[in-house]
Amino acid sequence: MIPDALFFAVVDRGKAGGLLHWAREKGVAGGTIFAGEGTNPSPILNFLGVSEVHKEVLMLGVTRELSQQLFTAMKDEFKMDKRYKGIAFVVPFRQWLPQAPAIPEDYDREKPPPFVCLITIVDKGKGELIMDVARKAGARGGTIVHAHGAGVPQDIYFPLLIEPQKDMILIIESRVKAPPIQSAIFKEMHLEEANNGIVITLPVLRTIGLYQPRGDRKGGRK
């Protein structure tokens, strides 16, 4: 099995291990769990003085066929289509292996996806500032991962070099709203300067558990 997609699940702290064990029973070779902080604002949490929720981010290298099975199980077994159960999404991925075939010229030339994943990597401690900038540009929330450069398995190719003491911010947003958010992050964080960080956009092939305000539901969940 040669993975051609990255499957992410953002869940409450302590639940990713069970998901990883379950995924291995479905045929996934391995995965990585990152500790993170959810930043999706909640009026109730803000009233209680709690604006962040401890999260775990599970990353799996899978085939797209297997990702379909994972999504079905996420809905049927883990009820992730319900509110506050977590978010799962898949982005394109190309694993390099000596026996892997060459990348075809039409690889991933698909219809524009309704959602994208913005990934920003900056120095540790700047994650909240990134979220402040993103929210002012229209983002509803995100997940901050405190990276230490030791979580990515050695047998997969992940095109991001995560050095010690970095914050990695994941934001899932509609394709229409993403460009101004990305531009705001790039401008306000001065990412054109060397060593200040990087922001990239990946197409989201499928997602579950992502809820939007009624006015933003074109192309998204209802």
Image: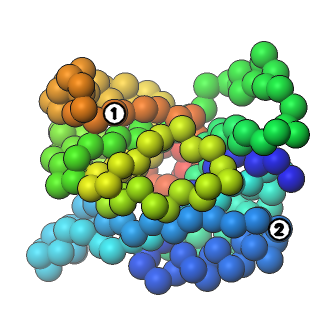
Residue 216 visible in the snapshot: no
Identify the mark nearer the N-term, 1 or 2: 2
Q: Which mark is residue 78?
A: none
Report x, y in % for residue 108.
72, 27
Report x, y in % for residue 83.
48, 69
- Where 76 sits versus 187, above or below? below
Residue 34 located left or right of residue 63 = left
- Along the viewing direction, whichever of 122 and 150 lies nearer the viewer: 150
- Along the viewing direction, whichever of 50 and 127 lies nearer the viewer: 127
- Along the viewing direction, whichever of 137 and 124 lies nearer the viewer: 124
- Along the viewing direction, whichever of 150 and 43 lies nearer the viewer: 150
Q: Residue at x 52, y 81 (%)?
A: 15
Residue 35 visible in the snapshot: yes
Q: Which mark is residue 198?
A: 1
Residue 217 located left or right of residue 40 = right
Name the kind of residue labelled 2 in the image.
Gly
Name the kind of residue labelled 1 in the image.
Ile
Q: Which mark is residue 27?
A: 2
Q: CA distance from mark 1 to mark 2?
A: 33 Å
Residue 21 located left or right of residue 9 = right
Q: In which quadrant of the rendered view does residue 96 lie?
A: top right
Badge 2 element:
loop
Q: In which quadrant of the rendered view does residue 103 lie?
A: top right
Residue 178 located left or right of residue 101 = left
Q: Residues within 10 Å of mark 1 (few under 14, many from 20)?
A: some
